[in-house]
Image (spheres, helix red, strand yellow):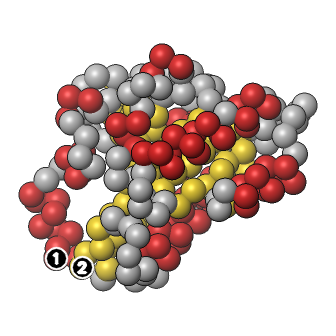
Amino acid sequence: MKVIVGKLVVVGHPGVGKTSTVIRYIERTFNTEVSSTIGASYFNCKMEIEDIIVKFQIWDTAGQERFKAMVPMFYRNANAALLVFDITKRESFESIKVWVKELKKNIQERIVMFVVGNKIDLPDRQVSNEEALQYSHSIGATYYECSAKEDQGIQQIFLGLARAVIQLSGTEVGHNLKVLDASSCRALVADASDANATDVGRTEVPSWSINSMAHGEVQKSGCC
């Protein structure tokens, strides 16, 4: 069985639901009191599609202005990105353009980009589906809409990411995905932690523990 190990970064304006989107998929829960991310939070996620296992090392980054200087360190070696905005707040959609520039500046290899319009359960929409879809196509990204609160569209996003990474792994050049057989994957796990495999220092790894956010120390990460 083939195993693909990729790094996924989640970026976007503060309060758009980046962490809630990831937690909704991994833990199948929604918490209205999730704290703002400080620096970045780390998650594991594993999916099996036909005879291929796709394992994502997910870095959920902070959206606040005061953390922007440190966020690029989490882009390093990324293979995929979720660019999340709130469909009821135009400012959050406009900020996606800034994140795209940052990703292209810091990542030289090919990267899968998904633009995600969150909070479709809310009224007073400010960004239309058509506008977001047109912009996504203009930057070579795929567009999805979802509601982390109501669990709408979440499964489709991560399934789409896995399929896109599988497709990327089939190209001979232009990516730095780890493509392994099952025995090689076991050896990788024995030799190094997931955090080390991303080339980000362990002292900078806030992590996810069930039902709480941990900032500044490594804890056991959630895994699906």
Q: Quadrant of the C terminus?
A: bottom left
Q: Which mark is residue 183?
A: 1
Judged left or right of residue 3, residue 148 is: right
Residue projecting furthest to the right: 124
Label 1, residues with CA under 10 Å away: few <14, some 14-19, many ≥20: few
Indicate left or right for 39 with 202 as reference.
right
- For the N terminus, the quadrant is bottom left
Residue at left offset 24%, top offset 79%: 181
Query: How many discs mark residues in the rendered view?
Result: 2
Residue type indicated by callout 1: Ser
Q: Nearer the viewer, residue 67 or 191?
A: 67
Determine the image quadrant of residue 130: bottom right
Name the kind of residue labelled 2 in the image. Asp
Residue on which the image places disc 2: 181
Residue at image location 16% in from the left, 68% down from the top: 186
Position above or below: 163 against 37? below
Let me know if residue 210 appears in the view: no
Is any atom of residue 172 visible in this view? yes
Q: Give the percent coordinates (x, y) of residue 66.
A: 48, 16
Q: Which labelled disc corresponds to residue 196?
A: none
Q: Are marks 1 and 2 in contact (CB under 8 Å)?
A: yes
| Secondary element at tag 1 | helix
Which residue is found at the position 51% from the left and 49% from the top?
A: 104
Residues under labels 1 and 2: Cα distance?
A: 6 Å
Q: Nearer the viewer, residue 113 or 33?
A: 113
The image shows residue 36 at horizontal and vertical percentages of 51, 22
Residue 6 percent across, percent down from the top left: 37, 60
- Residue 7 in percent (x, y) is at 38, 54
